[in-house]
Image (cartoon, rainbow, N blue to C red):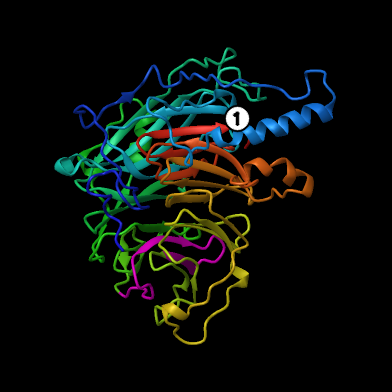
Amino acid sequence: MSKRMADEDNTGPLKAGGRPDAMDVDETPADMGEFEDEFEDEFESEDEIIEAGVDGRPDAEREAEEAMDVDNATPGTFIVGRTKLEPGQTLSPDPTTYRMLHNLSTPWPCLSFDIIRDGLGDNRTVYPATMYTVAGTQADSAKASDNSIMVMKFSGLSKMQGSDEDESSDDESDDEDADPILEHKSIPLNTTTNRIRVHQTPSQDPSKPPTTLTAAMTESTNVFIHDITPHITSFDTPGTIVTPQQNKPICTIRAHKSEGYAVDWSPLHAAGKLLTGDNDGLIYVTTRTDGGGFVTDTRPFQGHTSSVEEIQWSPSEASVFASASSDGTIRVWDVRSKGRKPALSMQVSDVDVNVMSWSRQTTHLLASGDDAGVWAVWDLRQWKPSAGAAAASSLQRPSPIASFNFHKEQITSVEWHPTDDSIVAVSAGDNTVTLWDLAVELDDEESKDTAGIQDVPPQLLFVHYQNLAKEVHWHPQIPGTLVATGEEFSIFRTISV
């Protein structure tokens, strides 16, 4: 089932590929320069923080009273995504739970974005932080010509006031009240970007930056590949001007006859190898040639009976990739297969499988998220090839090694932590981004302590409110930092990760 649109009255939930309502914004010039909001970093919290064990009473007496309080308070406990706000009530974040939190708006909401690795160093702990991203917009249908690819630089990302972490800042005083800055360069596109991904090819000249390519899967059915290296360079090189010629795509893939949401660059092909999947269930591979051009193999990979929602290359095997579909399956393929058929086909859900993430640390682990709000983790070593071509109704149904039904709306994004194979970030249509620690296991005593909150899995670390949450990515060079997109961009780091 195609997921192009939300309910006509815009009151129903959006599916993973659905489009959020366009924001009510003023007309904005194509090149806006900087965005600043002097109120973005002001938070208020009326939550009372009480430390246990400081009232001098015997532990048994205090613990008994606390248990009673939990039982009595549970019906009124607010759980994001579960509890409905009363008329006139609003949510505000508790700043004591964040190390960093910034929200920045763009002229139009973005369905998809990707983080660009930079030359500022790995494992950065310096504040204010700086990062680079690229996103595709979803302008109002009446203003489709306003759509663009936005190459962005976020800077001035300071840590929260009162943060006591042992991390340094560029300035001894660490101006925690400074407003973050969003600078951007626009590449006109005239169509909505459903999903966008970045690939970088190292330069043979150490003095030059890597070549940064983007692939945008669009509503127009075309896939546009751009070289955004000059756009990134222009942020930090005064006087640099991006020319109209540099805004043009270096390749347009026209193999697809329907739009799609699945696109991924191979991490093991330095020059560039791209997979794209569409709503017809077809997958194409495009390879960059030695001369710098691109060639698309016109023979599609076929096997899915409905739209391809997500594609990911194996992080360890150069010829292998996996795809997730609204037919409820995940299939594993080998590009060397002459028959263009999947090597493995597993029925992992009775509803659409919207998103998928392949662990970079433990490469036999795969996470998936579906339309019912369930996300699960699979051990690929347990998946066995079927004998012959199996019908969808008779496909194998493997058992996940972990499964969570906490979210009550569709899962819109899932991503493993880049260095910790037990931590996963998930976003969903219930306006939340959640962080999970799969290593958490409760013993019998701890299970008793959590009896009043059985609806919340112990592996749930954190819940972050994100209106119209669509995609979430870990920053690969700033430990524990996430960027999420929805109605606006949210950049945050919690004290729990």
Q: Nearer the viewer, residue 53 or 425?
A: 53
Q: Is residue 25 left or right of residue 351?
A: left
Residue depicted at x 63% and y 52% = 421
Label 1 sits on residue: 125
Q: Is residue 261 left or right of residue 457?
A: left
Instruction: Please tell me how crowded label 1 is: few (under 14), some (14-19), or many (20+) other residues with Cα within 10 Å.
Output: some
Within the magenta stretch, is there residue 40?
no
- In the rendered image, residue 62, in percent from the top left (x then y), is placed at 78, 26
Where is residue 253? Give x, y as percent.
Answer: 26, 61
Q: Please, is residue 309 above or below residue 43 in the view?
A: below
Q: Residue, x 49% and y 15% (percent of image)?
A: 177
311 drawn magenta = yes
| Vertical order, 358 against 167 (above or below) | below
Farthest residue in the bottom direction? 388
**Which region is colored magenta?**
299-324
Work out which residue is located at the far right of the displayed protein and give it. 58
Locate residue 12 relative to residue 41 in the image: left or right: left
Residue 112 image position (x, y, % from top left): 36, 46
Residue 306 is situated, as x and y percent measured from the top left of the image, at 34, 69
